[in-house]
Image (cartoon, rainbow, N blue to C red):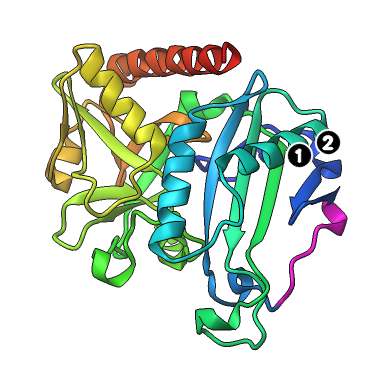
Amino acid sequence: MHSADAAPTTHDADDDPRNRDIRIYVNGEIVHRDEAKVSVYDSGFLLGDGMWEGMRLHDGHWAFFDDHMDRFFDSCKAVSLEVGMDRAGILDALTRTAEANGMVTDVHCRLMLTRGIKSKPFQHPALSRSGPTLVIILEHSRPVATLQAKGIRLATVPQVRGLPTSQDPKFNSHSKLNCVIACLQAEQAGADEGLMLDPLGFVNTTNACNFFIVRRGEVWTSTGDYCMNGVTRAKVIQLCRDNGIPVFEKNFSLYEAYGADEAFLTGTFGAQTPVASIDGKPVDDRARPVTERIRALYKDLIARDIAAQAGR
């Protein structure tokens, strides 16, 4: 939901009254949102022990479904989290939920899997004995148009994305406190989103999205070592390579970010969202020619992906 008086976020959507009566998938049952319940003993609630994916439904098909499932199943395998079904089963659950809601396009999905209900409220994974909990929330969701016009204000925050030996930032896990703290720090600094550095002090990502800058026609983003390697991030990098736009995954500091001609964020919900300022310093080129070209290429890529799925 979006309020005209609220500070913008990268996930602002136009208010849609249909979302008040959506039906949610919970372990095979599809129920009204008011009846969708998860146990207080669930591992996700107790510990943030779970993985999730965000996806978009376009013309009856999930954009880049295979890429999202690759990340989802790889993440679950890495933490010994049994999914309980294959990707065809996931697709069937998504399809059933969309049909129950009469949804076809401009839909955002939150697919969530936890280790399930625990026998006691403690940490050990062996206490989760009932099997996983799978929840699918679909909402009618279209990003507000003002995000493209105004852009997002970023503030560099002290909270960093850590080393893989603490909690690997590549996990799209339910354990998001690190990012929540960064978001709060940005809000307290008067910004919309937090720009997070890596453990070495290089520019990394924001609390919710991947971060790109444009300098003298070149597109730069972080090495990917300390950030969520987003599906949209990967698609933007590949689009640049395929279309003659110089792109670099590299270490760079706030010095280069402050001097950027353009900057934008990537994510499944907002695709490419422009950055208006970093630490109060405006990003210079409000025309954003490179960002707009990438947006057009990405929109075409989605259309081609959906057409390919429809032709299967």
Q: Relative to 29, is 87 above or below?
A: above
Q: Nearer the viewer, residue 14 or 223?
A: 223
**Residue at mark 2:** 100
Identify the residue under disc 1: 97
- Left or right side of 87 for 100: right
Q: Residue at x 50, y 40 (%)?
A: 10
Q: Could you classify mark 2 by the number of other residues whose Cα lies within 10 Å: few (under 14), some (14-19), or many (20 or more)?
A: some
Residue 132 left/right relative to 288: right
Give, as a single range, the part of the protein colored magenta.
Answer: 32-40
The vertical placement of 297 against 251, above or below, is above
Mark 1 Cα-neighbour bin, 10 Å: few <14, some 14–19, many ≥20: many
Q: Name the residue at 86% across, 42% down.
A: 21
- What amino acid is found at the position of numbered circle 1 in the picture? Thr
- Residue 293, given in percent of the width and then of the height, sits at 34, 13
Report the residue at 75% width, 55% height from top. Answer: 26
Q: CA distance from mark 1 to mark 2?
A: 5 Å
Vertical side of 2 occupied by 203: above or below: below
